Amino acid sequence: MNRAYLMLIGSVFLWGLTVVPMKWTLDTVQPFTLMFLRLLLASLLMLPFAWRGRRQSPESSAPIPWKRIAMLSFTGVAGYFWLNTYGVSLTSGVNASMISATLPLFTLLLAALYLREQIRPVQWMGLLVGICGVLLITVQPQAGGRHSLWGDILVLASQLIWTVYVVQLKRPQGEEKLSRELFTALSFLLGSLMLLPFAAWETWHHGLPAVSTRSLLSFLFLVFCCTILAYLLWNKSLETIAAAKAGIYLNAIPLFNVLTSILFLNEGMSWRTVTGGVLVLAGVVWAERRSPASRHAAEGL
């Protein structure tokens, strides 16, 4: 196996470890505060290197489309992290991981509605099977009551808003002239600023977070490994591997998150979760058999 595929697998593996450190950090840190600090620190660490690369690039004179990046940050950064992190704080890691596997299905649906891309009958069947799987996972009387249901809904909404972001990227309006590093760093920075009022409100009502050793190490792992390192490995691998081919590997992320949630969070799996997860993954595989749109979902990362 060559170096590019090792970096690709490494990035997918790190993204597949996100749920556990997020849950551990949420033990002592409020959701909005966690999102704000994670995005802000990642952007401040990435921005100097990304800006230096821009100055050395032949396209250094290209203007930065601030309004466009702000709009993309609203959906793909602030909106996604707002819904996903808050949802994870309310539901189980297993449920959140299984529901996150619906991303290709939403991409397929929005590509048809927004980009007018044709969906074949076999893809509609895959979408229907995936939706049935989501319903089995979320509608569980024994899953922890109303809070778990709302958490599932928020995680599901985060996949939908991320798909909106991906579809927006398929019609670029100037952001394609920026390097991936600079675009991501600026998106993180603007996204953190959008979340700042919510984090400030949270701190006002709940006070400063009580930092423990486990929550601090988990937060640093989220920032350096699950955010910065995973992105750099993914970006580097795409220099050799086509995005459509690399995107197939993203389907392994929910499986890693499920396994780590069971191992480290001591979470169980009901028959509904297992059956629903199988249906979601089957629907994704079925829909992606002839779906260039869903395979290109990785281009938004």
Image: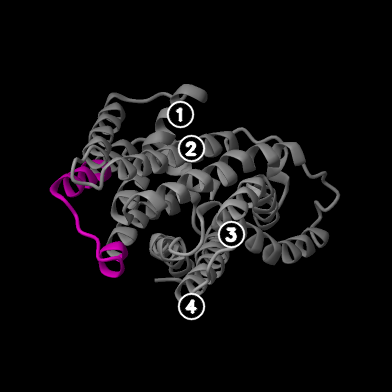
**Residue 127 found in image quarter:** top left
Instruction: Give the spatial CA distance, label 3 vs label 4.
Output: 19 Å
**Is residue 299 at all visible to an observer of this figure?**
no
Amino acid, disc 2: Thr
Q: Quadrant of residue 231?
A: bottom right
Look at mark 3 in the image and give the residue it sits on. Answer: 207
Q: Are marks 3 and 1 in contact (CB under 8 Å)?
A: no
Which secondary structure is most common in the magenta stretch? helix
Task: Say which residue appears at 54% left-offset and 71% top-offset.
Answer: 220
Tag 1–tag 2 contact (CB < 8 Å): yes
Q: Residue at x 69, y 53 (%)?
A: 189
Which residue position holds label 4? 213
Q: Secondary structure at mark 3?
A: loop
> Element type at marker 1?
helix
Between 136 and 252, which is closer to the camera in this rendering? 136
State the CA–CA distance, disc 1 to disc 4.
42 Å
- Residues in magenta, as a range: 260-281
State which tag comes first along the sequence, 3 or 2.
2
Residue on which disc 1 sits: 110
116 is higher (above) or lower (below) than 91: above
